[in-house]
Amino acid sequence: MSMKTPSFNLKAVVLETGIKAETLRAWERRYGIPRPARSAGGHRIYSRRDIDTLHWLIRRRKEGLSISRAAERWQSIEGEGRDPLQEPGFAINHLYLGERGTDATPFEFGENEEVDIQVSTACTEWMAACVSFDESAAQRVLSQAFALFPVETVCLHVLCDGLRQLGEDWLNDDVTSQQVTFAADQAMQRIKSLLAASPQPTRPIQILMACPSGEEHTFGLALLQLLLRRRGFGTVYLGGNLPTREMVATLDNIQPGLVVLVSQQLRSAGNLLDMSELFVRQGVPVAFGGRIFNISDTIRRRIPGSFLGTDLLQAGQNVEFVLSKPSHLVTDPHIADNQYEELLATFQANLPRMLAEISIATQGKNPDWATLVRPTFSLTSSILSALRFGDPSLLSLEADWLCTFLKSRSISISVAEEYLLLGLTVVQSVLGSDSGLVLEMLETLLKDVQRRSYESA
């Protein structure tokens, strides 16, 4: 049996690790660790690796790290392409000898476990209300939570954690896009109300906040705006999916002391790179964050700006740090050369033709191929981003979500292989002699998806 084969139910994991079920669910929502599979009935099923991961976290807690810091270390090691379980000093063959949670090593995710359970319950109830499209119930849960807990706690661990969980549920085909959209709208309404009630800025610096073209997940940016406003900063929130070409005029109008950019996905990160380079050339400092930078050190290092960290609350504190260090404000305006610029331009110029030919070739064929249209647009944008960062191997970051997408839509790996082979043929036909690297990128991605699919089978 593979270490990644889902085999253990929640009760078995609680018995082995000593971590309470409520805490396990809270860690999963907040930190994305562990990442259990789901049964046909929606129950969590853990693999041996998931349990090893929990023991790794237990070890870090006994060393004195908070759970948030331990999770951050895990993600940092993974982002560098290494396996945390293979790190020196962590011997897997000793995992099950005394590595169990006890009263001496509390596994609450905050200061008070009872409070954390109440917050976790509020998150669950809010998600249930949103899935039922019950606006009054959703708002009632939030009103009660804000009456009991600090604003930051509710925003981060009810709204943010809830939206993250619903996003994962959508990817697993457990909820619809309409349910996720409804929840996001409810959350944004509350953030806007809190912003409207915020006191006037007490600091002279204006902070411009935006998501680049292709990035429509704006809740994290809006929440960061609220956190900064509560710290007394003036902010100008531009929202998501913004083109780079008009930004110079915007800078002239606003004259910000800092620009904060957020991107969650590889497909939009390349556009964030373009935007950040533009700001640096204009002498405006940049700070940035988002999920894609949390998981890829390569991408993080290429952005000419200050990384705000993996935690939203910490991001607000890091903005303070960036602004307090004048020598750190403006990064080196020298922009690194990119050996793939010519291929990037060629691929981008021919992309409409390639998509059109794929559409024509799939008409009247396998009905499952119609479901793959959305991933096709995402993957082409991700290819552009990988080339923009000068690292074709970054496309493999898309393997996990693509594999999950196929599984949740009951699309067999063989159907995906046929569709991708059709795409390879079109790319080769349109790009001709320039197609070699793109073909190699797609073939590597296919192998990664095949491997993950077989490992989870």
Image (cartoon, grey):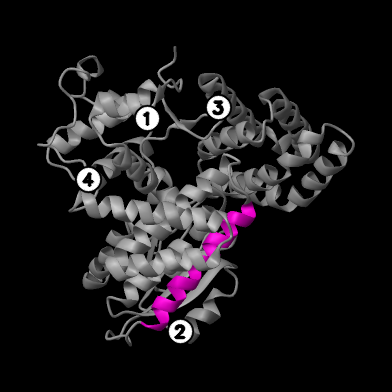
Q: According to the image, label 1 marks what residue?
A: 10
Vertically, is 158 above or below 243?
A: above
Residue 240 shows in the view: yes
**Label 3 crowding class (10 Å Cα cut-off): few <14, some 14-19, many 20+?**
some
SS class, disc 4: loop
User: Label 4, label 1: how many angstroms apart (C-alpha)?
Assistant: 17 Å
User: Label 2, label 3: how many angstroms apart (C-alpha)?
Assistant: 45 Å
Q: In the picture, which quadrant includes the N terminus?
A: top left
Query: Is 416 on the left or on the right of 45, as rendered?
Result: right
Query: Is 403 on the left or on the right of 2, as rendered?
Result: right
Viewer-nearest residue: 219 or 353? 219
Reading the chain from its start, which is encountered first: label 2 or label 1? 1
> Which amino acid type is marked by label 3?
Asp
Which residue is rendered at x = 74% and y = 49% of the image?
351
> Which amino acid type is marked by label 2?
Ile
Reading the chain from its start, which is encountered first: label 3 or label 1? 1
SS class, disc 2: helix
Q: Residue furthest right?
A: 364
Q: Mark 4 and 3 residues: CB-CB less than 8 Å, in contact?
A: no
Q: According to the image, label 3 marks what residue?
A: 448
Q: According to the image, label 4 marks what residue?
A: 108
Give the residues in magenta: 177-197
Q: Residue furthest left?
A: 104
Reading the chain from its start, which is encountered first: label 2 or label 4? 4
